[in-house]
Image: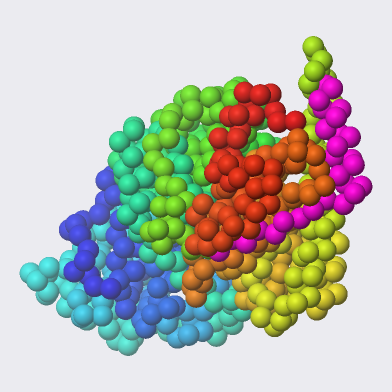
């Protein structure tokens, strides 16, 4: 929090600098006092320096602004002709300037302004000339906690246009030989503040304006955005992408900060190229808002969100692409979903971007879907794919397409390394062995016999094979004894000690499990596709603070939703696709204050009364998940003891060392394990 840490220039001019980001924002974040005299002041300017202003909310500091009301010709006539008192006209003018709009609502600007005034950290006075001419001087002084001062003067107003959009110039004074200039500006400001400047009258902010601003204060105090610095491994990933000409795939374990890493890379691209049109593709609509917030933390402020009805976004995207090509916009972000990214409308607009374009594909394994194969995004200057597991399950063509488009993996940060380095939490792993009921076993055997028959045919029906495999998988996912075991576990627990617990269940079982856990006295909530985005945020907040003890989910927590406070998870259902259970584990292992270890409980089906062949068929689908989870658990030996005893009777202990992708390759060779 000292100006000595800053590298400053003696002037900032719009031909070479972004005055708001290169000067204002950097200096204000290290200031404890900001005195500013300007021609005009509007609430829109606050959206540009919002991050700096938030610093004053969380630190001891003071902002003093002296501004001129933006009077219209009608206002001046009213004063001159005596229709209305000058103070009333000024109050009306200021009220017009403090109006909500799309940008300041989204940036929480008015809430920040209200909180600053509420906590007596922002004081505004109004200056007007005695002869109704324009008060138009512009200068300011910053102070840090060590007593250093930075003064500046120039053409920029404290308005959105003056700080971000107009062509402006300011001169900056901070060195020892500038002391006289700084002293003079400080004295001029003090004279203004005390209303002792000839030809000017300076008054307090009208009460009616204070009351209006107070009405925008939310119960929630704006959160101070962190100063984001890459961890050493993230810096390695950044360097790897830069050295690969801004292309490649980051294969990083879930929970290790792929999103932030990719946005730091985008900012590095911006620094080198001078401009950026960033396009982000995400799997689900609820991730659009989350990515936008992450982008804001890294300094992006201009957005187009492209999903849902095409009419709702095509017009704005067309305008933003045009303005970027014309040089009106220096940096912009378009965030879309994979569904919308496959549309003709999106592709035809994005391909018109002229240079300095950057693509980030979140969970880039989705990029291999057939609907995206004909995209026109290949002309992007930079292309970055993110995924803990970029290879596609049972889709070699899709995997090849991803690698051809983005290039190879340029940086890998695996689960073990992340845990060893403290980027993820250590965990214990306890498997529960679950048997099939007599009816479940009979149905599984019947489907298996039919599959054997189909695989023996010259031209087996792929749709029937797919349907039978789905039915067999559901038998394992929905095994009745899983629910009995889960409920018996929670009957024995001390209800007051249960918190931050996830239960992953099979489709169609959320209501059953949620209802029974609620009947047992737990504060539990479902978290599935029936819960809308707005309620999800409320539910996750209640889960974080402990108001909700247990969340019961199907797939909604698989990708993109952060639940770092989770300490315990029960895996009642999972497909054989490692992407699903590996990502679920990663979300559970995210670090969180006070969280030193996580617990994973896994329900593994091994049918005791099955034939050797059928037992091996089931084990070959269930044990790869065990192999993946147990290998990094701190109690790996104990977990292997539990499962090894079951497999020993069938001489299948070797399966405990076969990881999912190894089993996958064997499946590909044998056309699937029957």
In the picture, the quarter occupied by the C terminus is top right
**Is 463 one of the magenta-colored residues?**
no
Front position in the image: 478 or 586 = 478
Q: Position of residue 585 (x, y in %)?
A: 58, 55
Which is more toward the observer, 249 or 178?
249
Q: Position of residue 263 (x, y in %)?
A: 43, 48
In the image, is 460 to the left or to the right of 383?
right
Q: Is residue 96 visible?
A: no
Residue farthest toward the top in the current orientation of the protein: 458
Horizontal and vertical percent position of residue 647? 66, 47
Which residue is pictured at 66% across the width and 80% down the height? 497
Q: Tell which residue pokes out farthest to the left in this image.
A: 177
Quadrant location of residue 513?
bottom right
Establish if 411 lies above or below 571.
Answer: above
**Height in image: 663 above or below 80?**
above
Q: Which residues are magenta?
A: 428-454
Which residue occupies 70% across, 59% down? 432
Q: Residue 113: x, y in percent?
A: 50, 74
Seen in the picture, residue 304 relative to 520 is either above or below; the reply is above
Residue at left offset 80%, top offset 39%:
611
In the shown orientation, is residue 17 left or right of residue 423? left
248 shown above or below 157: above
Placement of the N terminus among the 4 image quadrants = bottom left
């Amino acid at each position: 929090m000292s100006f000595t840490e800053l590298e400053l220039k003696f002037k900032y001019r719009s031909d070479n600098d972004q005055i708001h980001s290169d000067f204002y924002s950097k200096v204000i974040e290290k200031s404890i006092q900001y005195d500013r005299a300007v021609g005009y002041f509007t609430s829109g300017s606050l959206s540009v320096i919002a991050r700096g202003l938030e610093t004053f909310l969380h630190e001891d500091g003071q902002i003093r602004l002296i501004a001129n009301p933006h009077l219209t010709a009608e206002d001046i006539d009213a004063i001159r002709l005596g229709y209305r008192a000058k103070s009333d006209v000024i109050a009306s003018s200021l009220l017009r300037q403090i109006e909500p709009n799309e940008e300041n609502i989204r940036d929480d600007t008015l809430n920040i302004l209200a909180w600053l005034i509420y906590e007596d950290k922002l004081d505004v006075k109004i200056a007007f000339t005695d002869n109704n001419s324009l008060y138009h001087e512009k200068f300011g002084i910053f102070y840090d906690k060590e007593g250093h001062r930075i003064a500046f003067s120039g053409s920029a107003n404290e308005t959105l246009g003056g700080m971000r959009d107009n062509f402006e110039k300011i001169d900056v004074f901070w060195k020892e030989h500038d002391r006289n200039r700084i002293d003079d500006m400080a004295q001029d400001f003090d004279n203004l503040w005390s209303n002792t400047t000839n030809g000017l009258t300076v008054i307090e902010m009208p009460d009616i304006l204070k009351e209006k601003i107070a009405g925008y204060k939310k119960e929630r105090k704006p959160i101070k955005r962190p100063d984001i610095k890459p961890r050493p491994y993230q810096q390695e990933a950044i360097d790897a992408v830069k050295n690969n000409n801004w292309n490649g795939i980051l294969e990083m374990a879930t929970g290790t900060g792929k999103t932030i890493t990719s946005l730091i890379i985008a900012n590095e691209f911006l620094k080198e190229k001078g401009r950026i049109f960033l396009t982000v593709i995400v799997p689900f609509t609820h991730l659009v808002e989350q990515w936008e917030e992450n982008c804001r933390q890294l300094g992006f402020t201009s957005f187009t969100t492209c999903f849902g009805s095409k009419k709702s976004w095509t017009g704005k995207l067309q305008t933003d692409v045009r303005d970027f090509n014309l040089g009106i916009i220096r940096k912009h972000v378009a965030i879309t979903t994979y569904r919308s990214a496959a549309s003709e409308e999106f592709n035809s607009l994005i391909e018109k971007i002229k240079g300095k374009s950057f693509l980030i594909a979140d969970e880039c394994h989705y990029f291999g879907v057939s609907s995206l194969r004909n995209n026109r995004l290949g002309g992007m200057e930079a292309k970055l794919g993110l995924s803990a597991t970029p290879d596609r399950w049972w889709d070699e063509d899709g995997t090849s397409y991803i690698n051809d488009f983005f290039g190879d993996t340029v940086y890998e940060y695996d689960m073990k390394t992340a845990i060893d380095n403290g980027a993820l939490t250590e965990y214990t792993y306890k498997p529960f062995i679950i048997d099939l009921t007599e009816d479940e076993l009979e149905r599984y055997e019947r489907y298996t016999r039919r599959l054997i028959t189909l695989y023996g045919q010259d031209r087996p029906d792929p749709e029937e094979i797919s349907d039978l495999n789905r039915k067999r998988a559901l038998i394992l996912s929905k095994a009745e004894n899983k629910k009995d075991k889960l409920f018996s576990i929670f009957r024995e627990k001390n209800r007051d000690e249960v918190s931050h617990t996830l239960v992953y269940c099979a489709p169609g079982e959320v209501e059953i499990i949620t209802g029974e856990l609620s009947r047992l006295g737990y504060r539990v909530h479902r978290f599935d596709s029936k819960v809308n985005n707005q309620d999800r945020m409320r539910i996750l907040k209640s889960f974080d603070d402990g108001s909700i003890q247990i969340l019961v989910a199907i797939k909604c927590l698989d990708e993109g939703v952060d639940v770092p406070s989770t300490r315990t998870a029960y895996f009642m259902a999972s497909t054989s696709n490692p992407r699903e259970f590996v990502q679920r584990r990663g979300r559970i292992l995210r670090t969180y204050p006070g969280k030193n270890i996580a617990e994973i409980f896994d329900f593994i089906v091994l049918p005791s009364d099955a034939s050797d062949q059928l037992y091996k068929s089931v084990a070959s689908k269930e044990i790869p998940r065990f192999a993946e989870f147990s290998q990094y658990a701190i109690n790996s030996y104990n977990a292997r003891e539990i499962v090894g005893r079951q497999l020993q009777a069938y001489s299948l202990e070797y399966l405990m060392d076969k990881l999912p992708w190894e089993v996958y390759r064997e499946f590909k060779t044998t056309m699937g394990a029957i």
